[in-house]
Image (tube, grey):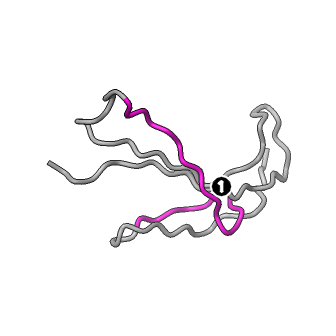
Amino acid sequence: TNNYAAEVAMFGGTSQKDPGYCPCAVPAIDKSFRIRLGSFATMGAPGNAYQWEMETMPMKRTMSDAVLLPNGKVIIVNGAEVSHLSV
């Protein structure tokens, strides 16, 4: 058996709440979101509900890239503080 559990993380994004509205410049947010999925043995077990955890990043970011390093840490590179959409 493995001694690890899968996690999903999202870093930054925009504060735009209306998906039908597409401005040219949307400010980024400084939040990251993570959910620990657990192992197949514990999925769906009573009291083991999945919940998103939110953390604040040092800088606002949108359109960033994340790389998982060999030591288990994640480095976030690239991105912008304002997204520029071309329609």
Question: What amino acid is at disc 1?
Answer: Lys
Quarter of the image where one finds residue 31: bottom right
Q: Is residue 81 magenta?
A: no
At a point 78% along the width and 49% down the height, the residue shown is: 86
Picture quadrant of residue 29: bottom right
Question: Is residue 49 left or right of 43 when viewed as pictured?
Answer: right
Left or right: where does residue 73 sit relative to residue 76? Answer: left
Give the answer, above or below, for where 66 lies relative to 40: below
Q: Mark 1 — residue?
A: 31
For the C terminus, the image quarter is: top right
Residue at left 75%, top 34%?
A: 19
Residue pictured at 64% horizontal, 57% vertical: 63
Callout 1 secondary element: strand
Q: Residue furthest left?
A: 1
Residue beneath the point at 71% across and 62% down: 60
Residue 62 picture location, percent across and down: 68, 57
Q: Which residues are drawn in magenta?
A: 47-68
